Image (cartoon, coloured by chain):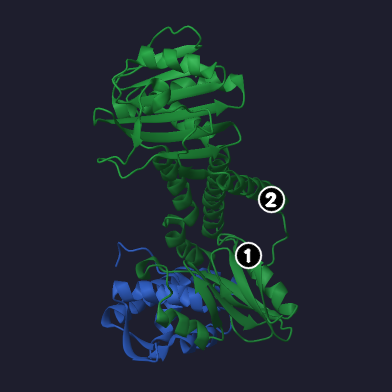
Amino acid sequence: MADKLPMTETMYYILLALERPEDGCGLSQRISALSGGRLTIGPGTLYGHLTRMQKEGLVGIVSSLRQQRTFVLTEAGKLALLEEYARLKRQVQDGASLEGLI
Amino acid sequence: MTRKYVRHPSGYDVGGNEKLYAHMAAQGWLLEKRGYFLSRLRNAAPAQLRYRIEFGDRTTAAALPTEQVALYEACGWHYVTGTGWVHVFSAPVDSDAPAIYTDPVMQADTLKGYRNRSSLSGFLVTATIGALLIFVGKPGSGSFLETLKSIAIMPWITQTASYLLFLCFFVWALYAFVREKVYTRRLYRRLRRGSSIDHAPKSRRLPHKIVSFILLACCTASLALSITQWAQHREYDMPAAADGPYFLLRDLGFDGERTTSHFVEKSNSVEYKRSLLSDQWFTYEVILDDGGQNRWMYQDIYILHDIGLVEPFLPALLQYESRFSLSDFKPIAIPGLDAAYEGRHECIAVKGTTIYLIRTNTQETPVDILEQLVSLSE
């Protein structure tokens, strides 16, 4: 994935929240909880990202009840999430000298 | 009154639509159904509601995917109505429903289908152009400019009010089309830059309202004139004696009993039309002469309301008529006529503000017919 652009924050948190399967609105609430309330994703934004991620094979659907779909990470999605996590971790490590300044 | 209709802004005026519906809800009128031009509201208890516009998905022919609607509703937004590419959701102001779009760039993507669609106004512009061309028929045999001129002038003089109505409607549709394209593009660029939509914009649409009002007034006036013009149209069996500026076969010296044509499903008739700029007579007469031959004559007579109209109208008529006869009209000099032309089977005469187009199988030469016309019209 070295040639791919870094993931956006929204995409990262969506994949992170899908560590366990979740439906659309529950996903939005989990993202908000994971980010400590810092990140709120509206249903429209969420739907757009989920649709794109499905096409890219990062996210799959595990069940569809009354048009409400439950999403789950695919293997490709897990790999992408881990790679992004590693990238972000390297970035933080690279800035270790800033630690005493915060 | 339990229901009423309001004129809503066009789809690209997202904030304007949302503000309108929220304002009406606060006054006790809830959106029930949105059409292409009007929204139907039902009377209910006043409510503090947020309304949000969502554009349809181009992969589902403008409809919203059911899973998208289900997701929005699970998050507290209620699907109210939708027509074409524009769909409306609502949620109480004090509810926990999150903003539908927290990312303007993502919302910009939803405009792509709406931007690229064949807009209704674009269709109307195209349909109006097509109707104008069908209205007059195929171009004649002259140059493109001459053809264009005849297409413009003929209906202008013979069906002035209807032509005005088409023009007003065309201008209105063109204005709406251009405005829609400009403002949709502007909204898309704004969202792509990361600026969110203003859900309660200040009303800055006065110039647009003035222009729309003027165009609507012009269309309404033209429609009223068209109805008046149409109401004066008459078609009836040709009387024994001419009741208009046309003349009969017996005036040319052909006597016989009136009959019906074998080739054309038509009997002897007179048609009268009136426009703002002209009176028109169209006659058809067919007789069985003493020799057992069918003699027929068509006359198209245009009485223009102003002498200044003759100069532009005559070439347009010659151009228009050349499509049927494929003959070139040659000018001929007839004393008593201001101008005269002969074609293969027809002739045209101009006397003052009256223009005659005569087609007949009487085998009289155009010169003979026109000389008799002069003596009959004196």
* Quarter residue B328 falls in: top left
The image shows residue B268 at horizontal and vertical percentages of 39, 39
Chain B drawn colour: green
- Which residue is pictured at 54% across the width and 68% down the height? B35
Q: Chain of mark 1?
A: B
SS for callout 1: loop
Q: Which residue is mark 1?
A: B8
Q: How many marks?
A: 2
Marker disc for residue B213: 2
**Contact flag, marks 2 and 1 (Cβ < 8 Å):** no
The image shows residue B239 at horizontal and vertical percentages of 47, 38
Residue closer to the observer: B183 or A8: B183
Q: Residue furthest front?
A: B290
SS for callout 2: helix
The image shows residue B199 at horizontal and vertical percentages of 65, 68
Q: Chain of mark 2?
A: B
Q: Quadrant of the C terminus of chain B?
A: top right
- Position of B8 with respect to A79 (left or right) is right
Vertical position of residue B179 compared to residue A5: above or below: above
- First in sequence: mark 2 vs mark 1: 1
Residue B45 appearing in the image: yes
Residue closer to the observer: B163 or B227: B227
Amino acid at pointer 2: Phe
Residue closer to the observer: B305 or B68: B305
Task: Please tell me how crowded label 1 is: few (under 14), some (14-19), or many (20+) other residues with Cα within 10 Å.
Answer: some
* Quarter residue B68 falls in: bottom left
The image shows residue B310 at horizontal and vertical percentages of 54, 20
Chain A drawn colour: blue
